[in-house]
Image: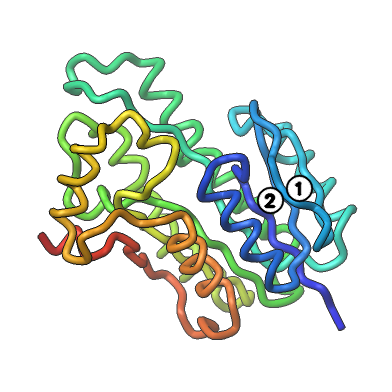
Amino acid sequence: MIKKTAIIIGASGDIGKATAKTFSKNNFSVAVTFNKNQVDFDKSTTDFKSYKLDLTKASEIEDFFKKVSSDFDYIDTLVFCSGIAQQRKLILDVTNEEIENLFDVNIISVIKCIREFTKITANKHPSNIVLVGSFVEKNGCSCESIYTATKSGLSGLCRSISSELGNLDVRCNVVAPGFIDTKMNNNLTCEEKEEIANMTPLKRLGTCQDVANAIYFLSSEKASFITGQTLYVDGGLILE
């Protein structure tokens, strides 16, 4: 029996770690990347390998995918969890460096990873790509316009890739989380988190496992006829 491998880009973050563990529990091998913080992950239950990867360096991305294809036999899924947030400010105050950094990590590196992944899998066996976006791409977000632009770009990229590579057995979808209870949101006070939860129809913040479950579903055979879609995991927040 073939053991599939999921590549998780950015597994040192809360969502990436939960996603890696979910694939592991479902008998996948996992290849995970980190940049500054090593992945804290129980390696005892699965084939596991971690790689240091700087997404701003094209040569490292190319070398990483060559190494993964050598280390694992059957590459099935690419999940892109990495991303950087924008410091909240008016667009007239955003620097060129901030703009370039946000686009480098949040969209340009995604394109490069998809390119290298599909070199390995396209027209060889069915494969899946899941990109982690954000619910802000639906209605926008004041004072985070550059971040929103990068996350909105993922949905357009996803639809185009799905159309372009569907006949090569490649599916691509986006999971767009709402407010998720992660370390990245620890800057919010308890009162602010409660206020956000009360704005959400389900009256709670999302969990990393909520997002990981959606990612795994879109990668599974149960979603074999789903491609080019953006799935909002936001407790209904965009309805408000």
The residues tagged by marks 1 and 2 sit, at their Cα atoms, a distance apart of 6 Å
The image shows residue 121 at horizontal and vertical percentages of 72, 66
Q: How is the image coloured?
A: rainbow
Labels 1, 2: front one = 1
The image shows residue 85 at horizontal and vertical percentages of 38, 32
Residue type for callout 1 = Phe
Residue placed most toward the observer, 236 or 230: 236
Do callouts 1 and 2 mark residues in contact (Cβ within 8 Å)?
yes
What residue do we see at 28% from left, 53% from top?
135
Note whether 181 is above or below 176 in the view shown.
above
Label 1: which residue? 65
Where, by quadrant of the figure, is residue 231 drawn?
bottom left
Mark 2 neighbour class, 10 Å CA radius: few under 14, some 14 to 19, many 20 or more: some
Instruction: Say the numbered circle drawn on residue 145.
Output: none
Residue placed most toward the observer, 122 or 11: 11
The image shows residue 36 at horizontal and vertical percentages of 64, 26
Residue type for callout 2 = Glu
Tally the marks.
2
Residue 88 makes an appearance in the image? yes
Please report whichever mark, 1 or 2, sits nearer to the chain's N-terminal start: 1
Q: Look at the image and tell me in which quarter the C terminus lies.
A: bottom left
Residue 156 makes an appearance in the image? no
What residue do we see at 72% from left, 32% from top?
59
Mark 1 neighbour class, 10 Å CA radius: few under 14, some 14 to 19, many 20 or more: some
Label 2: which residue? 116
Identify the element where label 1 is drawn: helix
Identify the element where label 2 is drawn: helix
